[in-house]
Structures are given as structure tokens and as C-alpha cells.
Image (spheres, grey):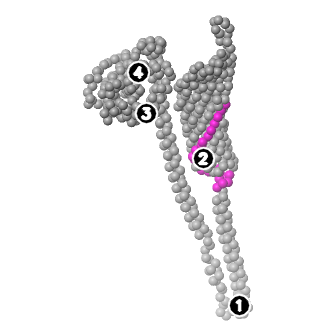
Amino acid sequence: MNQNKLVELCKKGDKQALSWLYQTYADKMTKICFHYVSDRQIVQDLLHDGFIIIFTSINSLHSPEKLEHWMGTIMKNISLRYLKQCSSTSTISLEEIGEDEAPIDTFPSNDFPSYKTMLKMIESLPEGYNKVFKLAVLEGLSHKEIGLLLNIAPHSSSSQLSRAKDILRKLISQYRIMIGLFILLSIIFIQIWLYTSKKTITTEQSIATTQKEKEQKAESILPKDSIKTILNYAPTPPRYADSESIRKISKQEVILQDSVAEEKDSIKLSNHQLTENQNTKERKDFYSIYTPKQLSNNKRIWSLALSYSGGEKQINSHKSRIPGDISSGHSKEVLKKSYHHIPITLSLSLRKKINEYWGIETGIQYTYLRSDFTVIGDSYSENIQKISYVGIPIKGSFNVWKQRRFSMYTSAGMTLDIPVKATSEELTSENGQIISQKKSSLYPHLQWSADFGIGIQYHITPSIGIYAEPNLRYYFNNGNKLNTIRTAKPFNMTLPIGIRLSW
């Protein structure tokens, strides 16, 4: 593929062309950065920043044959700007860099976000940060020039550029975390599937072995043929015995035969009763699968739960007075109202039973928060704030009580919530007409929380149960200035309700 065709496809946003561009020139651009900066981690950041600029500003390249030189100039400017900030500048012209020189070090680039993802990250920056970032990085303007264009102070431009870069780095880090979580969860589910398959095969083999042992035991119950010897025995009368003696012996023989017959009947009856008792026991064992005793003494150590939980909504409102126009001289009354909707959380958790009482639990959960802020005065202003989190809980559980189909337990642990999407929609209207409407992205911080709960579960079958687990949760202060229900009410109560599958 020639350079003209490559540049044309990149300008159209072709993903394969952009990927090919990165893979082709990444090593050479790394080499350029390494000639200025020796720190590997900083070079990685500079390379990422440089390719973000290249992908977003390639439409400004008018001469495709100068693609490599244009990219090298961008990398050089980024490196020099970094050195200038560190007050240690060194310059090496691009002509001094040979085509066959290898970079000092390389690093894997598989985790580099896609073109579409990087564009979304840049466009999601707040409006002020977005403008300063494009003017400083894409156009190469100084902070003094940016200040004149945007009518802001030079130090404000420098501050906004620094914050814009920090936000981009955080977004890239969150992107990597999400990829890692997806891989981790995939591995966990594969292991669960393998474990379940292995246990099914083992159970089938165990059932076959148990059936064989029962057949052997039934054969061993049959009595030994000792009655035949007794029946064949008959006392022989003396050769010269008289008739009286013969009659006595005959009488004794009859008595002996009667007693032997009775013994034979009793043995048969005993064997019949033993066989019947065994069959009765087997039937009881078969039907005891669904008895409360079996439910309470099962040996299942893994469980997978799917739950839904809500919380408490919160509504606050207060009136205040602000100064009026100079002409009127009267103050105006303004009503401010905040409405925090009920948080919605969906959880998928995996629990392992350590022993009869203790267990450990982890998983993944999705949380959606919404808050509406309104200001009512001469005009009407509304701000709708939406935040989505992906959380990773780690808990310990303790079984307190079991009886028939019911069981009770306690749980306690920590949860890390990672923000994945946050937006703000602002609407201003006056006399029923919309004056302005604006949508922007928000950047909440990571959120840690601790919780303690008491759960009760009802076993529908040995492997399926429904449960409710009311818990108390406290959200730690993460230094974020966003107003949410977690900042307004850090200590609250939730009620997860779900279904649990055990094996």
C-alpha cells in the first residue's frame, strides 16, 4: 500500500489503515522519543500522546509523501515540550537519525486503545480542556497565544492542558482495567465450567460404583447352605434294639425334623425381613434427596448468585434570595431543588464455601446513579447527571442458622466501584422557550465502600434458592466534587434480592 492510499484511508477513519499506520511507524517514532527522553514509561506516554495527535489531525496533512517527516516532527515537538517543562532540553535533528537504527527499547502495544476509542476520549474532554488541548498539541501554539485566542490567562491555559492530559491518562487506564476485568471474568467462568463438567463425570462414576457395591452386598446376604447337613442327619437305631427303643428313636427323629423345619422357616422369614428392610432403606435414601435433612447437610461448596438491589431516594429543596437588577433594587427569590433517584444495582457473584460456617465471595456488579438539579427563578434551569459504575466486591460470609429449607447468614466486605460513563445535560429555558442546551462528560473518581449485611435464604431445591440480604453500606470520601446520593448520604441501606445456584 503506497503512502497516498494509506493517508487517504486514514483520513476516512479506516480502522485497518490506522492500525497498519501505527504498527508500521511505532518503532521508528519510539526511537525518536528515546533520543530525547530516556525514561521508558515517559516515552510510552509520549508515544501514545503523539499517535492521538496523528490520528486526530491527519486531515491537516496536505502532502502524503511527507507523512513520515510530519509524524517525526510531532514526536519531536512533544518530546521537546516535555524536556522544556523539566528544564532540561537537548536537540537532535531528524536528519541525524538513520533509517536502520533500532530503538533503544520497545514495549508491547497490544493494549493501545483503538482509533474510535481514542477519538471518543478526546471528544469527551470538557469543552475548555478540549479547545486548549487541540490548540496546544495539534496546532503547537504557546500558552500565551492560546490565552489571546480564548481570552484566558496563560497560566490558566497551562493548567487546563495539564488536566486534560491527566484525564486522558485516567481514561486509558480505566480502559485497560476493563479489558483486564473482562479477561479475568472469562477465566473464572471457564474454570467453573470445567469444574462442573468434571464433577458431573465423577458423580456418574460414583453412582455406578455404589450400584455395584449394593448388588455385591445383596448377594452376600444369602445364608449358607447349612440346613442340608442337619436334614440329612438321622440317628441309626442299634442293631439289636427292641421295639420300644425303636419307637423312642423314631419319636426323637420326628421331633428333630419338626425343629429343623421350624428353624428353616425362621431363617427364611429372617432373610425376607432383612431384604425388605434393605429395600425400605434404599427407598428412604432415594426419596431423601428432597428432604429438609438432605438440604441442610449438602456438600455443595460453590454458588453463583444473580441479584437486584435498590436503595433510598433523596429530595432536597431550599429557597434563597439573590440581588436583583440595579434598576429595581429588589432581591429575587430562587428555588433550588435536588432529586437523587433510587440507585439501581445488578450483581453477579461467585461464592466458595471454605467450611461448614465460613465462605468467601467476589464477582462483578453494575450500578446506575441519576440526579436532577433544578433552579427556578425568572428562568428555569435543569441539570441531569447520570453516572454508571462497574464494581468489584470482596466479601466474607458466616452461616448463622439452618433449619429445614431456611438458612441465615451474615456477610461483610469491601467494594471498588470504577466509573465507566458519566454525563451531564444542562437545559435553560425562559418563558417556555429553550435558551440553551448543553451535554458534556463528567469524570468521577474511583469509589470505595464497606458493607455489612444479614441474609436469609429459602431452598426451593437442593441446588436452587432465593434470598434477601438487607445490608448497611458506607461510601468513603474520594475527594470528588460531584454531587451524588453517595456524597449527600454516604451511609445508607440497600436490599439485594436474588436467586442462588449451588453445586
State the CA–CA distance, disc 4 to disc 2. Answer: 54 Å
The N terminus, quarter of image: top left
Residue 501 badge: 2
Label 2 SS: strand
Q: Residues within 10 Å of mark 2 (few under 14, many from 20)?
A: some
Secondary structure under badge 4? Answer: helix
- Work out whether residue 248 or residue 81 is closer to the camera in this orientation and state it: 81
Answer above or below: position of 81 versus 65: above
Q: Is residue 158 left or right of residue 383?
A: left
Q: Which residue is mark 4?
A: 137
Earlier-in-chain disc, 2 versus 1:
1
Which one is nearer the viewer's eye here, 190 or 359? 190
Pointer 1 or 4: first along the chain: 4
Asked whether 8 falls inside the magenta stretch, the response is no
Give how far across and how far down residue 405 sits, in percent.
68, 48
Q: Residue at x 66, y 71 (%)?
A: 271
Q: Looking at the image, do the residues carrying marks 2 and 1 touch, with CB atoms under 8 Å apart?
A: no
Earlier residue among tags 2 and 3: 3
Check disc 1: other Cα within 10 Å, few if <14, some if 14-19, many if 20+.
some
